[in-house]
């Protein structure tokens, strides 16, 4: 959960006398929390016998508001712990881009559209090269606008992955190309090539991810709080 930068909340019945600073287990527990950059928020008794057993812990930058312990005994011998957590889920903004529906273009329609245009007619020997290029661009542009007009699509970008670089994108494109080739031909050789490249891609992903997080940890040295704060930040 920490690696994926999620807000972490630890809570429940720890069966620990958190109010007793002289208790050995309580002291060990209290010394453990700072090493994870966490803090415990429940104060006061949470059990009929007056002990603080039910705890709520978060990272130091996620302090809850209005942490209260209901009087025990109403339903259980433990208190009901309530709090308001300052957690806000930010949805990435929608982005818009212009695309063409190339897959819906029929080859027969494209062939008929080209046959009816000047491009398929005989070119005179004294034709001007610049005029031919202009005619080529204009006619093909009109055909494309007719068969595959531009339209806008919206999409919400996914969670950023800092270790995903240009090599990863290139390998992903290659795997998708090989998959399409196999889906079209259904040949065992194409399937074998697709599987081999996909396995190699996942191996590269794993190596890059491990190297990225190893470098992040090395930057923090031996400080456990700095390590956890580094892992809980997205970049």
Image (cartoon, rainbow, N blue to C red):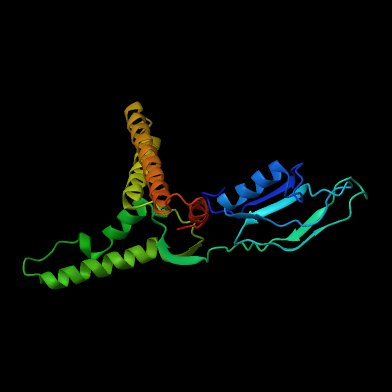
Q: Nearer the viewer, residue 11 or 133?
A: 11
- Examine the rendering and report whether any part of residue 36 can be seen: no
Q: Nearer the viewer, residue 233 or 21?
A: 21
Q: Nearer the viewer, residue 37 or 150?
A: 37
Residue at the left extreme?
Answer: 126
Residue located 81% across and 56% down the image: 44
x, y (%) of residue 193? Answer: 32, 32
The image quadrant that residue 16 belongs to is top right
Residue at the right extreme?
Answer: 74
Classify 50 as above or below 86: above
Residue at the top extreme?
Answer: 188
Residue located 32% across and 68% down the image: 142
x, y (%) of residue 83? Answer: 75, 60
The image quadrant that residue 199 belongs to is top left
x, y (%) of residue 99? Answer: 41, 62
Residue located 30% across and 67% down the image: 141
| Position of residue 94 in the picture relative to residue 178 (left or right) | right
Residue located 67% across and 46% down the image: 27
- The C terminus: image quadrant: bottom left
Classify 71 as above or below 190: below
Classify 68 as above or below 207: below
The image quadrant that residue 14 belongs to is top right
| Position of residue 134 in the picture relative to residue 224 (left or right) | left
x, y (%) of residue 211? Answer: 37, 45
Q: Nearer the viewer, residue 53 or 64?
A: 53
**Number of disc labels:** 0
- Examine the rendering and report whether any part of residue 117 can be seen: yes
């Amino acid at each position: 959960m920490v690696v994926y930068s999620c807000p972490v909340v630890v809570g429940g019945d720890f069966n620990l006398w958190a109010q007793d600073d002289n208790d050995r287990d309580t002291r060990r527990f209290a010394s453990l929390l700072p090493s994870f950059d966490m803090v415990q928020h429940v104060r006061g008794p949470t059990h009929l016998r007056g002990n603080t057993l039910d705890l709520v812990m978060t990272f130091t930058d996620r302090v809850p508001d209005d942490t209260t312990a209901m009087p025990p005994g109403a339903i259980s011998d433990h208190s009901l712990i309530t709090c308001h957590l300052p957690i806000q889920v930010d949805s990435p903004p929608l982005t818009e881009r212009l695309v063409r529906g190339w897959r819906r273009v029929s080859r027969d329609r494209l062939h008929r559209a080209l046959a009816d245009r000047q491009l398929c007619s005989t070119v005179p020997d004294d034709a001007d090269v610049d005029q031919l290029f202009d005619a080529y661009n204009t006619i093909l542009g009109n055909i494309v606008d007719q068969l595959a007009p531009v339209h806008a699509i919206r999409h919400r970008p996914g969670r950023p992955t800092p270790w995903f670089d240009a090599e990863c994108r290139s390998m992903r494109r290659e795997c998708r190309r090989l998959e399409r080739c196999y889906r079209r031909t259904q040949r065992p050789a194409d399937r074998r090539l697709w599987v081999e490249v996909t396995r190699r891609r996942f191996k590269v992903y794993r190596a890059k991810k491990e190297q990225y997080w190893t470098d992040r940890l090395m930057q923090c040295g031996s400080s456990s709080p700095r390590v956890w704060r580094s892992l809980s930040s997205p970049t």
